[in-house]
Structure formats: structure tokens, C-alpha cells
Amino acid sequence: MAVYLISLFFVYFFLTMSKFGKAKENKLIKKIGIIIPLLILTIIAGIRYNVGTDFLMYESFFYNSTRLKMFSPELELVFVLFCKILHLFFSNSAIMFLLIALLIYSIVFKSALKNTKLYELCIFLFIAFSFYTNSFNVLRQWMAIPLLYLGMDYINEKKWKKGVPILIIGILCHYTSIVTIPIYFICKNIKKDITRIIIIITSIIIYVNLDFTMQLLYKMIVATGQGTKYYKYFTKEIYTSLNTNILVMPMFTLLTYLGYLILVPNIKKMEKTPNQNFLINTLIFGFTFSLLGTKNVLFQRLQLYFIYPLIFVIPFILEKCNKDLRKIIYILCIIMGIAFYIYSLNKNGGEPLPYKTIFS
């Protein structure tokens, strides 16, 4: 556990230092203060060995890359290209994990710097919410998630020529992106809090009546004749076996939205950028998917596409608060973030522990 906590400290320290002192005037020093944390996260993720439930599966893809089909419904093109190209020049799978980690975290950093002045808090929350260690497992999905949000960021700015190609690359990282992108475009156009509240209430109603909802969805997907490998997720045996009632992420998403409603004055709500509005809306669907995800593994996997904005919305709320309140909430975020990170590591979901490297 020590490696994760120590890395969290240094990442936060260097990012904070990049905002003050000489870094404030010197762009080179500021860049160094940002690059060092990026390298720390990339190296820890890249040199790990058999850390994470899915590690050995992804390692086998690398070593058997010559057998992988370029176009397959089971494995996405971008990941296959990573495996095939890198295996031509390198004999060790560590290079694949390093470069994929660099891809994921560099885009997370880019979005953080683009969307908030409190980028150090943004990256801190990415780690504290365990998104960082989660990316050790659902690797292809985490290749897609930051790309999709970067693409939508450009589209929200009406830079379609930049945004659309990025979305396409995101889809080719993980095919489940096809399901989420239409919802992103719905989020792009939601403007009123009353609409968000209706979505929250509807989510709770669906949660209470999940059996009926799953049967309805099952009939719809069977009628299309597509997605046969996902049929099992709609059977009662699968989704009732996941009835964990762990409402941590639904609670985080709901409390964050309530914080937005209460702490951000209406006049400042009107100052939202299109992307901030989009992030708040996706977080509402984050509540939906994470709530239903406590009972169904399909929603549990999809929730990652919608709870990711937590790391952006919380800093956005703080930016809109008055200075005194901002300091109090900021400190609470740090204390509670560290506590939750330790709690998550102790639970060892996805098996980030024990941490081992290719050298050991």
C-alpha cells in the first residue's frame, strides 16, 4: 500500500508546486512540476507485474499478438494495434503497459489542465476515487474513457473536426463506447436542474423495479439480434448475484450534485461553460448507472463512463464558492480523499495489492 500513498503525496506535492513560487512565472518550471507527477503515475502502472485481476490476460494478448485478428467483435482495433506493433520491436510486455498508461494519464492530465484551475485537486481525486488503480484492470475501457471526454470537450466547443476523430478512436478502444456516446449527446443538451432531478427520481424508481426493467431491456436487445455475448447480463441469476447494496458511488455522485445546487449561486451557474454543463449532466447519469450497478454487472461496468466527471465537477464547485468556504471544502476533500483511498486499497477491489514489479 505504501507505494500508492507515497506516489499520491508526491503527485499532489509537485502539482501544487507547479502553481506557486517560481513556477507561477516560469513556464518551464511549471511544465516540469506537471510532467513529474505524470511520469510517477505512468511508471508505477507500467512496471507492475501481475498487479490487477486482468493483468495476465492482457499480458497474454501481447505475447500472442500474432494470433489476434485486426477486426474482431471480441477485441478492439486500437488495443490490437498496440500489441502487434510493440511486439515487433520489444520482447517484454512492460512496454505495452507503460505506453498505454502514458496514453491514459496524459489525456486525464490534459483534460484537468483544460477544465479547471484546481488541476492538482482534479488529479488528486482521480487517484483518491481509485480510478487510477481501477485503470490497472479494465484497461481498454480506460483507454476509451478519457478520449471520449476529450472528444466531447472539443465538440462542446464546436470543434467538430477535432472532437469526432477522437470519439471514433475512443470507440475503437472499447466497443461499449457506442452505447454511451448517444447519452453524452443527451447530456450535451440538458440545461435545467428540474430535468436533472427528474432523471434522479426516475433512476430510483427503476432501481426499485429492476426486474421489470431488465426483462424489458432483454426483449429489446434480443429483438435486434445483436450483442449476444451480453445476453447473460440480463438474466436474473447474474444481476441478483451482484446485489451488494454498496452505495458509495451513487452517494458520491448525488452529494456532489447537491453540493452544486446548494453551494454555487444561481448567477454563477449561468457562467458555466458548455463543457462544465456537460460534465454535471453526465454525473447525473453517473448516479443512475452506479445505483443500478449495485445490482447488475452490466451497469456496474458502464458506470465508469459517467462517474469519471466527479474529478472535474468537484473542483468546478470549489471555483464558484467564496474563498473562505472554498478553503474549508478543499481541506475536507483532501482529508476524506486520503481516507477513502486507504479504505479502497484495504478492500483490494481489482487486486492492486500486493504491488509487485517486473524487477521483483
Image: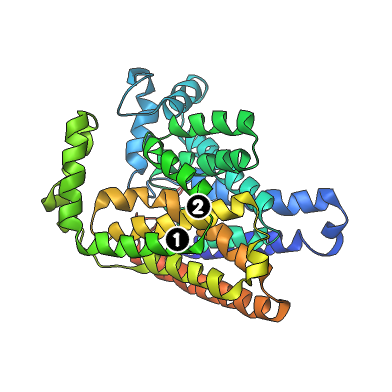
Q: Nearer the viewer, residue 178 or 247?
A: 178
Up the image or down, 167 lies above or below 41; here it is above
Image x and y of residue 190, in percent? 50, 52
Residue 356 in view of the camera: no
Residue plotted at (32% across, 60% down): 203
Q: Quadrant of residue 254?
A: bottom left
The Cα–Cα distance between marks 1 and 2, rounded to whole angstroms, is: 8 Å
Q: Quadrant of residue 157?
A: top right
Q: Which mark is residue 196?
A: 1
Image x and y of residue 360, in percent? 45, 48
Up the image or down, 318 lies above or below 168; here it is below
Q: Which mark is residue 190?
A: 2
Image x and y of residue 162, in percent? 63, 31
Q: Is residue 20 left or right of residue 298?
A: right
Tell me the kind of residue under disc 2.
Ile
Q: Which mark is residue 82?
A: none
Tell me the kind of residue under disc 1.
Arg
Q: Nearer the viewer, residue 216 or 41?
A: 216
Q: Secondary structure at mark 2?
A: loop
